[in-house]
Amino acid sequence: MSTDERSLFSRSSRTIYNQWSEFSAHGFLNPVSGMIFEGSRLTCGMPLGAVDTGCIDLNGDGTWGYCTIFNSHVPRRGPINQPVLGMTVAGQTWLLTTQPLHGVDEAVGYATSASRPTRHADRLWYWGHYPAADIQYETHGAPVQIALRAWAPFVPGDVFSSTLPAAVFEVHLHNRSSSSQSGRLVFNFPGPSPMESGTEPLRRREFHAQAPTHLSGVEIESASAGYILAVQEETDVWTGDCLGVDAGAWGRIDQGLPTAAHGPGASISLPFELEPDERGVKRIFLTWLSPRWNASGHPDPANLSWLPWYGVNAETSRSLSDAGGGRSYSHMYARLHPSAWDTMQYMARHHGSLLERILGWQAVIYDEVELPGWLADALINVLHLITETGLWAVGAAPLGQWCRPDEGLFGMNEDPRHCPQIECVPCSFYGNYPVVYFFPQLARTTLRGYKAYQFDNGEVSWIFGGITDNPPTPPLEMASPTRGYQTTLNGPAVVDMVYRLWLRTQDDTVLEEFYDMVKKSTSFTMNLRPEAGPDGIISFPTGNKGLEWFEACTWAGMAVHVGGIHLANLRMAEAMAIQMGDTAFANQCHEWFLQGSHAMESKLWTGDYYLNYWEPETGRKSDLIMANQFDGEWMVRVAGLPSVFSNSRLPQALSTIWRTCVAATAFGAVNFSDASGVPQANGEGRPGWSMDPTAFFPPEVWMLGMTYIYAGRRDEGLDLCYRCWARIAELGRIWDQPNILRGDTGEVVYGGDYYQNMILWVLVAALKEQDLRGPARSGGLIERILFAANPASTDDESTLATAP
């Protein structure tokens, strides 16, 4: 029996749940690879949303999770924990969630206050393939089987479509009984909180068979937040208030929906009739508009209750509160789609073609024979971090005049739930690759921010705004650049981001626009320790003031990690100087490279690996083995530039790392090890900042795995990458991406929405031992994804012509 005749995805005796397997799925010609979760195993569900629109999580238990579509970012609203769907059929009401509600006897699963017994779903099976989530509900005893495909319009290469503030809920029904069945399907939505909707009364409008798309539903709006809930070409449609977690209200959905004149939430009910073995689809549309966010992260700019949660002291909290908490910014999505009603009309007309394009670009990835199944699944799902963390501000005050209104400023939030700040530079160094591949115009606006915020001495900005500087600025601020404390690597990260955008686009105007920033930054970085002469090129700044990405560590003098990255910076800066015809600076970069390389090879090589650090003038030395001592090598391999380490020594050092740091954990590679393979902590950074000896960062593990691949050790490198992603998946955190794991237990130490982890997209190039541009060339995977997402028949109004 075909998938169309069964359900959204096949489950057979060969299906391995909570592990990767191949299976047939609705809308795909060939089998796909993915992980079908029992919903209760997920820590967060997949977010429904796209570029700058905010998102709302569809949790694995059938309830709404975290929500930012109405601009509650810090702290993030939720989990809301209200059911999404219910059904009444054959004298029985079904709550399509496994979560108990108020008034429900958990032992029997019946509502004690309902007018008749109410049953819960027995189990949910959940397959996410961002931006779509498929759920199959097990409802033992129900004559009608239900499955849900919920999706948002995320279309690589199409800014117009990918900024539509909308979600579609396609409910698939199947009458499994031998008799006709009729009933009602109910969709529940909580709407904005009172804080999100503002002080003015909400306006509520019900509509039925509204032309020209024959929509019926309800619209609720205020000046600061609004949404529309609708169905198309349906009769006998009921609308009402939010059902919440009131089991009694859910138990009466066969009779009607609760009503409230000014409530923020809504529900919608539509009938169905099915003959024996008949199938049908009911489609619910949701669109929203909440056009401005406050830099405080909260809808109320004066509400800074979040500050203590992130370790901000009371004095600083009072200071920020007295200043009003933060300025406000306008969403670019609201500029492109200023009417929730117009968005609803567009979705009603084009949902079919949009979903076809989404499944089309996903099929290109699933069908790529050179990608292992786990990686195809990972590449698709890790893109959810763009909607979890991305904000795109219209170019207007408080942004400066350098920012054009129609181009704006795009930035990503390091981790909204744990470390909220915009454009922490190492995070974008790790994680903006899919933005560069699929939305290069957005990546270019981000670089314009770095250019505008560069300090007079050439130092680049650490963040555009956020909590980790002293004093902190509001977490969603985009016009409060600060220097930060990772001084020695901030500049190389920005230089790399310029180079990768130039390489991917082959657009020399990128260099014309950003070369001066690159030149100033490079000169600043290479002169951080001038008194050390050539050794200073690979060293920490004078007095060892200034940390690096491994910020919870002790550092001093020359260091292999920093040194290699500085040398990679010089390779890139020299290439860009040559392209710009700046012979003098190209020669300077080359000379600096030769000096730094000589210091690296003559003073840090031990015979098996490179010293962690050495400060000759004080005698401070660390002979720990750093797993990621070759990050600079990875940078130049991805950039298609010559090596920065000795090609004769690299294989030996990689073998040493494998024997020690990799062998110490089943889940990746510990950050540091001694020569006998015992994990070490490498001291502390700021006072009190230290790491568990077994800890590691997932993006660093993937960089190391790719370094092995580029060095010709493909199987080892790919296995290393797999181990780390597999552990994250096993923990149920596909849509809850961590920053640090423990190597001994595999448990999460820190982090929840780290967009650094989108670095996985570089594996597409690494597996073919190509530079970043390779997959974007004619016939490459990136080019084929973009073609499938944007076929020639695409409507004129959804093309890149509307994008900046």
Image: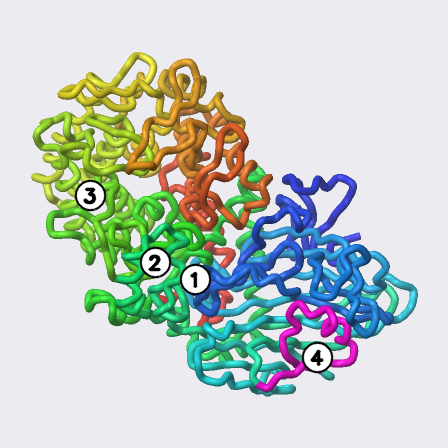
- Residue 27: x and y, percent? 65, 57
Q: What residue type is labelled 4?
A: Leu
The residue sitting at 10% across, 35% down in the picture is 588
Question: Residue tagged by mark 3?
Answer: 576
Quarter-of-image position of residue 121: bottom right
In the image, is residue 706 part of the stretch drawn in magenta? no
Distance CA(mark 2)–CA(mark 4)? 40 Å
Residue 580 in sight here: no
Tell me what residue is drawn at x 81 percent, y 64 percent: 144
Disc 4, disc 3: CB below 8 Å?
Answer: no
Label 3 or label 2, whichever lies nearer to me, is 2
Q: Earlier in the sequence, mark 3 or mark 1?
A: 1
Image location of residue 501, percent across then percent down:
30, 49
Across and down, in percent, residue 2 comes to 76, 53
Percent x, y of residue 228? 55, 77
10 Å crowding of disc 4: few (<14), some (14-19), many (20+): many
Indicate whether 525 appears above or below 533.
Answer: below
Please name the residue that numbered disc 4 is placed on: 257
Residue topped by disc 1: 73
Name the residue type under label 2. Pro
Position of the C terminus, as image quadrant, is bottom left
In terms of sequence position, does the residue under pointer 3 or pointer 2 come before the other? Answer: 2
The reply to whether the C-beta atoms of the residues labelled 1 and 2 are less than 8 Å apart is: yes
Taking the view exactly as shown, the residue that stands out farthest to the front is: 314
Q: How crowded is mark 3: few (under 14 residues within 10 Å), some or many (20 or more)?
A: many
Residue at the disc numbered 2 = 475
Marks 3 and 1, how far apart at CA: 38 Å
Q: Which amino acid does label 3 sit on?
A: Met
Q: Is residue 241 magenta?
A: yes
Q: Residue at x 42, y 55 (%)?
A: 416
The magenta segment is: 237-261
